[in-house]
Each structure stands twice: as structure tokens, then as C-alpha cells.
Image (cartoon, coloured by chain):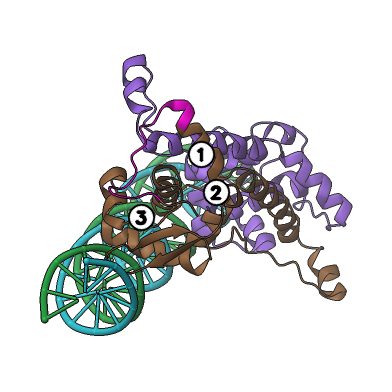
Chain colours: A purple, B brown, C green, D cyan
Amino acid sequence: MRISSKVTYALRALFDIAFHNLGAPTKVDAIVAREDIPARFLEQIFQDLKEAGIVGSKRGRTGGYFLLRSPDAVTIGDVVRAVEGPLEHPCCYATDAELREKCALTSKCVTAAVWRDVTLRIDEVLNSVTLADLTLKGELLGVKREADAGFSYVI
Amino acid sequence: MRISSKVTYALRALFDIAFHNLGAPTKVDAIVAREDIPARFLEQIFQDLKEAGIVGSKRGRTGGYFLLRSPDAVTIGDVVRAVEGPLEHPCCYATDAELREKCALTSKCVTAAVWRDVTLRIDEVLNSVTLADLTLKGELLGVKREADAGFSYVI
DNA sequence: GCATTCTTGACGTATGCGGTCAGCAATAGC
DNA sequence: GCTATTGCTGACCGCATACGTCAAGAATGC
């Protein structure tokens, strides 16, 4: 029930791409310089984000990582699920009726049902905040914008 | 961002005391028999719950652990905080104005502020469910009630 | 005095997080 | 085609924490 540093790194990196480079290909080195994240660890995190379809990558001289969706289509819940798996809970809820009948008779399943409700509500919270909200907040707070040298694409 | 088995054990044990024994002293052995929790580990968990003022204990033949507050005054949030500490997040938000000014200029603090909002909302969710809700659910689901042999106090 | 039960603290073990490293593959510019 | 730059892959490691065990002691009731 705590926020891992892995997921905070992930969110900071995504914010960085969205805010400083408008979602365009951004080099790991540039992100690391701005965000104070261990470089090798960040690449590992990007692999998770890539598998989840949140970012894409491009190799070579003009390469880097970039957003595959627009910032308002990426929620914090997406990021959490991408880097540390779904917020699941050991739950004995079976799908077929007979098992559920049996299952509902133990206190184990009372608590399981409650945890289920709780995690669903937590998911709602996580899904209600998007990357776009973050960039907006960044502007409001007056974070200095700093595009990568030379060019600036828009997706 | 997952539910530890320690906190699920804690909740099951508290539910057990509230549901089967109406909050009266309940032996660890009885709870273990009903709830399938490692005995030694449960005692360790009870120490945390005791420090947090959720349960009390009594030694000897009629001993056991019991609730110190009524079930509707114990929330899941209380239990989570008792066994795994507060849902905090590494946040650079300083209290004095100067530091906050400086801090707000980095993207680190944008994400920190967002995490702060999110964890506050998660806390609200956790604080909105009480032990009483659990026992009610247990009754609705028809969990068999089983008072400890011999006597049955009411606080 | 004796059985029962909680108390305490040390101990072990496994899992996963946070982080590193070396070597390979693709891209761009010459 | 050569080279520099960048991402890709997967193995590796130390450490903290979660999880669980054990043994001896202290309180309580009979």
C-alpha cells in the first residue's frame, strides 16, 4: 500500500516527455539530466511502458522514446498497471455459482469481497488523473519548459 | 500498490473477533482455527494492532484479544496504517515558503503534488469502510456464527 | 502449583525492489 | 560501407522487507 519509486520514476519520465518535448522522441540521457533518474533503471522501466503500449521507441541518432497516445489518454492507473501489474488482491471469488455459494460461507470471502470493492474504488481514483492534468499543473506552477536542441515535432 | 497478506490477515482476524465473539476476548488459537492464519505471525500482527489502540489483550485462561473500540469506529484505513504504516509518499513539499517556491520549479514536485492528491483520495476510500460494514456483510452472506465455548460477553 | 494464554525478542528464509553491467542491434550521417 | 549514437536484451547483484518460526518468560485462573 505504498507508491514504489519505480512508478514515481515512470510518471516523472512520462511527464518529462509530454511537457518538455510535446510527446516527441526524447533521449534517455535528456530525461535523466532533467529528472534525476538512474539511467539504466529508466530504460528498464521504459520496456514495461512499451509493452503496455504507452510509449514507442526509435533507435539511432534521432531516436528516443515517445508517447503513443495523447497525454489525456494516459492515466496514472495505466502507468501503475504497466510497471507493477494490476492492483489485484488474492480473492477466492469463483465464477460458477456452486463454488461461490460455498465460498461465501467463510469469513475469508467477506473480507475478499470488501477488498475487491475497495480496490475498484482505488482504481477509479487512479484512472481519473491523466498526463494532461500533470502538464497543466506544470504550467500552472511555472515549471521551465526546455525543448531538446534543434527541432520540435508535434505528433 | 498491492494489498499485503499481513493486512489481509489483520482484517480477517478483526472481523473474526467482531463477528464470532462480538468483540470479546478471543484466543489466538480459535481465530487461527477459523481463519487459516499462521499462529505466530498473527500474534506479531496483534502487537501492531495493540500499539495502534485497536485491540487490547488479556492473559491467562480466559484471555485473548478483544476490540477496544466498537466495530463502527474501526476503519480499514486504521488497520492499514496500524500494520504497514501510513500511506505516505516521498514528497519534497517543504513547509516554509522559500523552499516551496524553489521546489515548485522542478517537475519532481508536479508529480509529487499529484501523488499527494491521489493518496489523500485513496485514504478517503480506506477510511469509509468500517468493521461494522464487514460484520453486516457477513450476516448478509450467511456466514455461520460460532461463539467461543462456554460464555459470551458483550462489551 | 499447574495449565493456559499472551509477551518478547531473536532468528531464518524468500521474495521483490532498486540498480548495474556487458554485449548486441538499429539508425543516421559521412 | 563505416562509424557514432542510440535503444534492446537479459543476466546479475545487494539489500530491505515481508513472511514466518522458535524458545523462553510472565501473567492469569483454577
- The x, y position of residue A34, in whole percent, is 69, 61
Q: Which residue is mark 2?
A: B71
Q: CA distance from mark 2 to mark 1?
A: 9 Å
Percent coordinates x, y for residue A12 in the rendering = 66, 53
Q: Chain of mark 3?
A: B
The answer to whether residue A29 is left or right of residue A1 is: right
Amino acid beneath label 3 = Thr
Chain letter of the residue beneath label 1 in the structure image: B
Task: Answer yes or no: are tags 2 and 3 on the same subunit.
Answer: yes
Res. B26 mark = 3
Magenta segment: B139-152
* Residue that label 1 marks: B134
The residue carrying pointer 2 sits among few (fewer than 14), some (14 to 19) or many (20 or more) residues within 10 Å by Cα, namely many
Callout 1: SS: helix
B105 displayed left or right of B128: right
**Side (left or right) of B64 relative to B125:** left
Instruction: Indicate which disc, 2 or 3, sits on the residue closer to the N terminus.
Output: 3
Q: Residue at x 71, y 67 (%)?
A: B92
Mark 3 nearby-residue class (10 Å; few <14, some 14–19, many ≥20): many
The quadrant holding residue D26 is: bottom left
Pick the residue in front: A111 or D8: A111
The reply to whether callout 2 and callout 1 are in contact (CB within 8 Å) is: yes
Mark 3 or mark 1, which has the lower sequence index?
A: 3
